[in-house]
Image (cartoon, rainbow, N blue to C red):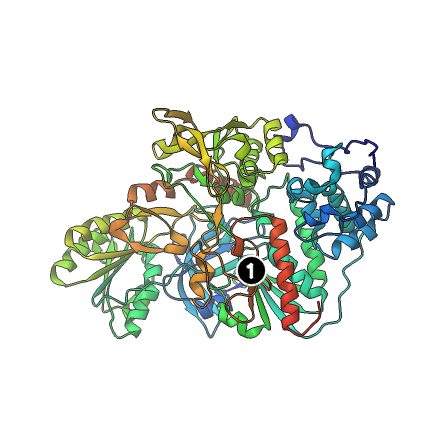
Amino acid sequence: MAIEKKPRSKMPEQDPKERARNFKEVAFGYTPAMAQEEASRCMHCKNAPCMQGCPVSVNIPDFLAATASGEFEKAGDIIGKTSSLPAICGRVCPQENQCEKMCLRARVDGAVAIGNVERFVGDYMLAHGGKPQKTARTGKRVAVIGSGPAGLTCAAELSNHGVDVTVFEAFHKAGGVLVYGIPEFRLPKSLVQAEIDKLCGGGVEIKLNTVAGKTLPIEEIAKDYDAVFIGSGAGLPMFMNIPGENLNGVYSANEYLTRVNLMKAYLPNSPTPVQLGKKVTVIGAGNVAMDAARTALRMGAESVKIIYRRGREEMPARAEEIHHAEQEGIEFCLLTNPVSFCGESGWVKSMRCVKMELGEPDKSGRRSPKPVAGSEFDIETDMVIVSLGTRPNPLIKNSFAALQTSEKGTIVVNEETMQTNVDGIYAGGDAVTGAATVILAMGAGRKASKAILEKLGMQS
Amino acid sequence: MNKIIKKTRLAENVTEYVVSAPDVARHAHPGQFIILRVDEDGERVPFTICDYDAIAGTVTILVQEVGYSTIKLSQIPEGGFIADFVGPLGNPTDLSEFKNILLIGGGIGAAVIYPQAKALRAKGMPSDVIVGARTASLLMYEKEFKAAAENLYLITDDGTSGVKGFVTDELKRLAAVNNYDCVFAVGPMPMMRAVCALTAELNIKTVVSMNSIMVDGTGMCGGCRLTCGGKTKYACVDGPEFDGHLIDWDEAINRSKVYREQEKEHRCRLTGEVK
């Protein structure tokens, strides 16, 4: 069958020059007409390959069909069957590697912009969707540790089945990485709050300022609840352990982003201080590195460089994030690896780097970089943001000896049920996988909720 | 929201707060700390726990008004509320391997060693305590220490109370006649560094409590990192207590000054606001 060519509707965005200096959201979102138009591009393939690309198997053809005919609330309900936070997923999922990668149109005239339409539907539901219906309570009680994507999803699913859920959050604000990590210009915090408020309206209680394992021992929580889900994320930043790394002006991406996002250091009168670097370097090329680099630009940096030891093809960030960063004027120093930092009066002044070349593919399938002898050179910088990934926080493991963890510190679970080695205690998200994506964490939260419902003798 | 049950002015710019925080009080141990936010927009600031009462559900902290948040906190009346109060964070003090301990508190650090003095008294091995301050009015917890310590030695820079001099002078004198196997020193970083320099010479194991700058207090930001024995450690989850002889003090003191300029600006803004 020949497909009638009809290009993908472009997402309207703020002008790169302008947005590089403000914290407003980069993309404006589709209008209803644009969403309908784009949704109508779906060809409704018989075996829906897009759904196989979705970690939570959203019924994509059906929600697109509903959107195309203008039944936005119906579209929202269809997504809601398998995904709790569409306004968030529509913004931060790597669709180009998931649903949209599988779309048959991808090779013809561009994949259906499933993510953009999902975002539209998610926003529509937040603005117009009815209040969550409080399901009849069953008297069952489940504790969720961590209010990030995994915890929130698990809590929402359980609550929808009449389980009373208490979420324990260490920070003073709920949302986990959605509020401390992902910047305002990519995921507005008011939107995260709206999703959380909706959840709380449905019968989820969030206890802030409660560090599980410290404020309340996990044993104590386990005794008080019928089951426990641990979604404590991977919050421990990795450093390079090279000379000068503890100079003033060298941040972890976690600290920099937390100061700016969660602690609102981007507002002029914020009591939380943050350094305002002029010549900023960001080490790493994942999504968090792009977030940190683009944030530094918005905080007034004159120049921002991404320092990455591999090549362009190997950068782990989403294509869209790299594209946005480039548009905004971020420079990319590829095949470059820092070896030390140089300071003056305790402050970082420059970074010594070495050029790299790519060798044979390593275990991850990416070509492994090797230093080029004698290629050392210096980059002037007054602020460095180290963004090399994170590991699970050992706090939970250290305070709960019975819990089985891997060498990397991740919690070991039965992959079918997400149950840990301790009966009645489940885990999912980055705490189990190590740093991954929002949608995978949500998928894990959903999977665990099903197993918990079964354990409690309830049909999911 | 956590209620300030009792607020007492202890010295010039130093206030003791007894805060309602039942879960924290129930699980706290000497040496641990809390993080608070004064109000909805506040920054997160760590304070070491000075005392706690699991039955009353209260935690006591001592705050010196030095910057934006501490001044703001001092403006909340008794009976008022603190927006956020989280803890207990960090590891409890563990001095169980030592038999004859000397506690040294400098300035507000005296409050931090108080729970340790009390715990050692409760264990039936009360310790010698040196409390030092710039001047008599800044000496804290004198009465409490008298009850908890074996011997209490007061030192002031200007001689207005106790012996005139520095805590290191008294440490030198006491170490000559006592057989201490551990010194636990808490106070401003330069004081802790001076104590460590001396005890290294005297070959006495020394534990210090590092009050580094931090955001979350759970290992997430890495802002509190310091070098101990050549390795990077986090004050929040690996500490706050470390072997003082292994700390890179130049680096730690340098890192403690990272927001000095911004802090000055904040303070001016605040004093402008409350005029």
Residue A406 image position (x, y, % from top left):
45, 58
Q: Is mark 1 on a helix, strand or loop?
A: strand
- Looking at the picture, tell me which residue is in the foreground, B133 or B251: B251
Q: In the displayed structure, does residue B104 sit left or right of residue A441?
A: left
- Amino acid at dot 1: Phe
Considering only vertical position in the picture, is A262 above or below A8?
A: below
Percent x, y of residue A194? 70, 52
- Front-lying residue, B65 or A348: A348
> Horizontal placement of A112 versus A274: left or right?
right
**Looking at the image, which residue is at 71% across and 32% down?**
A13
Of the 4 image quadrants, the one containing the C terminus of chain A is bottom right
Label 1: few (<14), some (14–19) or many (≥20) C-alpha neighbours in 10 Å: some
Query: Which chain is disc 1 placed on?
Result: B
Residue pictured at 50% horizontal, 55% vertical: B36
Quarter occupied by the N terminus of chain A: top right
**In this rendering, does residue B52 appear at all?**
yes
Left or right: B130 as drawn, with respect to A133: left
Residue A34 locus on image (x, y percent): 81, 37
B120 displayed left or right of A210: left
| Residue A76, percent from left and from top | 78, 52
Total marks drawn?
A: 1
Looking at the picture, does residue A332 appear above or below residue B178? Answer: above
Q: Is residue A373 above or below residue A62?
A: above
Residue drawn where x is 21% and y is 48% of the image: B197
Residue situated furthest right in the rendering: A69
Q: Mark 1 points at which residue?
A: B81
**Residue B125 sits in quarter:** bottom left
Between A195 and A7, the one lying in front of the other is A7
A363 w.r.t. A278: above or below: below
- Residue sitting nearer the eye, A204 or A390: A390
* Any part of residue A203 in sight: no
Instruction: Please identify the residue farthest to the left as the structure is shown.
Output: B177
